Image: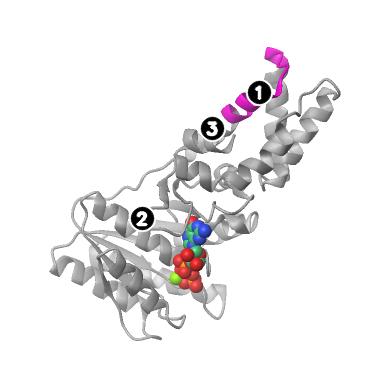
């Protein structure tokens, strides 16, 4: 909880400067709500969602006669919690061999998330192997291997430029052969074109499906909170092309754009499973709507 609070500090401060003192004797109610709306927009909640949240806040404030900023904050916190609650999600892994595909555009934190996830799942009794399917970017395989070694898991790799789907296949085979139960697949973020990337991911997905005789148990889309509203477009593309079962929102620490989680929750409709609040392996948190709303407001 305190890591989440610390991580969300900048977003919280951005909101707080607008919301605290919004209700004051020198200000009309309209001015107060305007300030709150500006605060929401300043932390990347987006114009539409901010407008709707403030309309709801107005309605509730009028109904119960809110007269101070503290009460306003509590009311806003409830509204945020209610928006986030429906997308609160947990990993759904079967007993036996499970496959988790980690996807997203370049630099969002996929490889780091793979290592954090491996660490976490091992701490919960699963045995993990990694698949280095980013055969595109130079040094991507080594990066994964180093992070994997740090958390004590093996990485299945081919040479750079090899077929990512073949790496995924080998990793699934190696998982079963070594008596392990979880394959986490790291994928590329950049190819020559976005279309190429989507084709490559679809192929990895197909090959995994053939190898375990069902689709990957989880396809986690990593979104970088610092990209703000761009994350929404990325989510649309990946959802359409590769089928996404969960979102990981990274880099919430050090950004004031953490409010982007709200349009992600409202418009994408995919469960948010984890949030990343730092570079350390411990900095991947289960997403909880209540905790998030409390840490934000
Ligand atoms: N502050 C912070 N940094 C993070 C977080 N997650 C990842 N990073 C950093 O973001 C940078 C990129 O992370 P990677 O895991 O390499 O990202 P990627 O998506 O695998 O990148 P490509 O393989 O190039 O597509 C690294 O410096 C990470 O340490 C986070 O939650 N918070
Ligand atoms: Mg990577």
| Residue 9 point in image, percent of width and height | 58, 44
Q: Give the alpha-carbon distance from disc 2 to disc 3, as whole Å.
A: 25 Å
Considering only order in the chain, which callout, 1 or 2, is on the residue closer to the N terminus?
Answer: 1
Q: Is mark 3 within 8 Å of ligand 1?
A: no
Left or right for 125, reference 63: left
Mark 1 lies on a secondary structure that is helix
| Residue 217 point in image, percent of width and height | 32, 55
Badge 1 crowding class, 10 Å Cα cut-off, few under 14, some 14 to 19, many 20 or more, is some
Left or right for 83, reference 204: right
At x 72% / y 29%, what residue is drawn?
55
- Please give the residue where the numbered disc 3 appears in the rendered image: 81
Q: Nearer the viewer, residue 219 or 297?
A: 297
Front: mark 2 or 3: 3
Left or right for 30, reference 121: right
Considering only order in the chain, which callout, 3 or 2, is on the residue closer to the N terminus?
Answer: 3
Task: Tell me the tag on residue 70.
Answer: 1
Range covered by the magenta-colored residues? 62-78
| Residue 289 point in image, percent of width and height | 48, 36
């Amino acid at each position: 909880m305190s890591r989440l609070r610390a991580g969300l500090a900048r977003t919280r401060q951005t909101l707080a400067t607008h919301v605290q003192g919004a209700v004051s004797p020198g200000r009309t109610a309209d001015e107060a709500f305007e300030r709150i709306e500006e605060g929401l927009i300043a932390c990347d909640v987006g114009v539409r969602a901010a407008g709707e949240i403030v309309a709801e806040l107005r309605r509730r404030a009028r109904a119960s006669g809110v007269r101070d900023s503290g009460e306003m904050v509590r009311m806003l916190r409830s509204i945020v919690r209610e928006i986030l609650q429906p997308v609160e999600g947990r990993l759904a892994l079967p007993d036996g061999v499970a496959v988790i595909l980690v996807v997203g555009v370049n630099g969002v934190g996929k490889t780091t998330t793979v290592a954090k996830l491996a660490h976490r799942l091992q701490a919960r009794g699963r045995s993990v192997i990694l698949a280095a399917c980013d055969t595109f970017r130079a040094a991507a395989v080594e990066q994964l291997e180093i992070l994997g070694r740090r958390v004590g898991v093996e990485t299945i790799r081919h040479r750079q430029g090899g077929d990512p789907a073949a790496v995924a296949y080998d990793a699934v085979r190696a998982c079963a052969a070594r008596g392990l139960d979880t394959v986490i697949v790291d994928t590329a973020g950049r190819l020559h074109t976005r279309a190429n990337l989507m084709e490559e991911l679809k192929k990895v997905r197909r090959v995994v499906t053939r190898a375990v005789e069902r689709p990957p148990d989880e396809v986690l889309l990593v979104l970088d909170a610092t990209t703000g509203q761009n994350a929404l477009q990325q989510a649309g593309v990946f959802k359409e092309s590769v089928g996404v079962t969960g979102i990981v929102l990274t880099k919430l620490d050090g950004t004031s754009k953490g409010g982007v989680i709200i349009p992600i929750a409202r418009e994408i409709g995919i469960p948010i499973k984890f949030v990343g609040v730092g570079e350390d392996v411990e900095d991947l948190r289960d997403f909880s709507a209540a905790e998030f709303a409390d840490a934000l407001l």
